[in-house]
Amino acid sequence: MCRDRSRLSCLAVALCFFVLFGTDPSFGAADEVVRVAPFSADVTVPLGHRCMGVLPTKSKTIDDPLDARGFVLLSDNQQPIVLLALDWCEVRNGAYDEWRNALAAAAGTTRTRVLLSALHQHDAPVTDSGAQAWLDKVGLQGELYDREFHSDCIRRVCEALKESLATAQPVTHLGLGKARVQGIASSRRVVHPDGRVDFDRYSASGGNAFHANAPEGDIDPLLRTISFWNGDKPLLALHSYATHPMSHYGKGGVSADFVGLARRLRQKDLPGVPQIYVSGCSGDVTAGKFNDGSPQMRPLLAERLHKAMTEAWRATQKQPLTQLAFRSAPLELPFHEGEEFKREQLLAELENGQLKTETRILAAMSLSSLDRVERKQPIDLPCVDFGPAQIVVFPGEAFVGYQLMAQQLSPDTFVMSIGYGESWPGYIPTKAAFDDGFGHGWRWVARGSEAKIVEALKKVLPETHVTK
Ligand SMILES: [Zn+2]
């Protein structure tokens, strides 16, 4: 394409392209080295703390700790990229910004280049600084989350990040592996004998014969593992699988649940290789077909996931790392259409001392999100592009359909979708799920979300593939 143009004008065209699409020049210069610095810190919630935002029973015991695990990708020719996975339920609005601002400052990069996701365990906190500020106004200090604990977690994770930078190692190769997971994921959507459709197969529905026998439904059965290598030395493994991560919850036993147990088993197998787990897009996916919620199921589900992690590692194919690009698209999702989500109604609920605290917390969370939507603060939809593989972080409880759409938009590459990024939207049903009448109080977005997300996905996924 450069035949009729000078070398300089070619460069100008290339620069314009990168400016227009917000893309970093692809890595590939002979002298460019990418390095990775893994870091981790404890973010276990204190006793007496709210879990899942609205569970009536606060934390009573620490069954196992909650981790923050992440890495920084460093390159000579572009700003660092940070990925952090928290064993928390959700991080929303101002709290999400606080985490990303602090991590960006610690890594020496911009907030856009910080990929943050919660794994979505339910015996773990939900944080939203705007919601807690609304609660403070009506005397419900600390009812959603403990600000001091939150700030302390951010501080300690950022310290761990900064310390890790000195230990960064060169990444020469990218490893990609997949394995089919048996006996965990099933769709919440079930079709009853009379043709009625509902989404009531929850995480522990397996004790019910109908839910245990209904087909798995639309899921993504694959666990995906991306690994970084320095020659023959593995540096880090990042695993993703699309399911709600709960075996049982709600009794005050803080836990990283079966996904955390599986990660720790894998960490014991490979002590020198940091293991990071993220939940895929799984708003409508649970272990409900296979899990009856009894305590013995937690280690069993962990074993099944651990087996898939091991198999994906064995199946890993390495190739030289020749590209590191980053793109991000702004996403403005429409707010819930219901009358009960109007400001006046929400304020009345928040201020009504006769209502349950949990109801008032939900109203505060809604107000915080409404504030955000009204000030037109978009969600970032980021994509790290390694060439043959991409990592995309989706907001909230995006349904698994979004993960499948991302794969369809880039069919020749290995797309790792991560759910539970900016989590104010709650459930993000696909158009098909809206058509099926999906309804739930944990939904803050309206119809039309799918078109917006697909539009943003097309901007961030590799261009050559999306035009197919
Ligand atoms: Zn959920």
Image (cartoon, grey):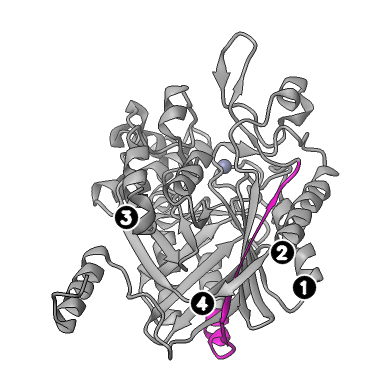
Chain part drawn in magenta: 158-182
Foreground tag (4 vs 2): 2
Mark 4 or mark 1: name the one nearer the start of the chain: 4
Furthest toward the right, the residue is 296
Residue annotated with mark 2:
313
Q: Is residue 313 visible?
A: yes
Q: Marks 4/3: CA distance?
A: 24 Å
Foreground tag (2 vs 1): 2
Q: Are marks 4 and 2 in contact (CB under 8 Å)?
A: no
Ligand 1 lies in which image quarter?
Answer: top right
Q: Is residue 340 above or below residue 451?
A: above
Q: Position of residue 434 (x, y in %)?
A: 43, 27
Residue annotated with mark 4:
72
**Amino acid on which disc 3 is placed:** Lys
32 or 468, nearer to the observer: 468
Residue annotated with mark 1:
270
Q: Which image quadrant is residue 327 in?
A: bottom left
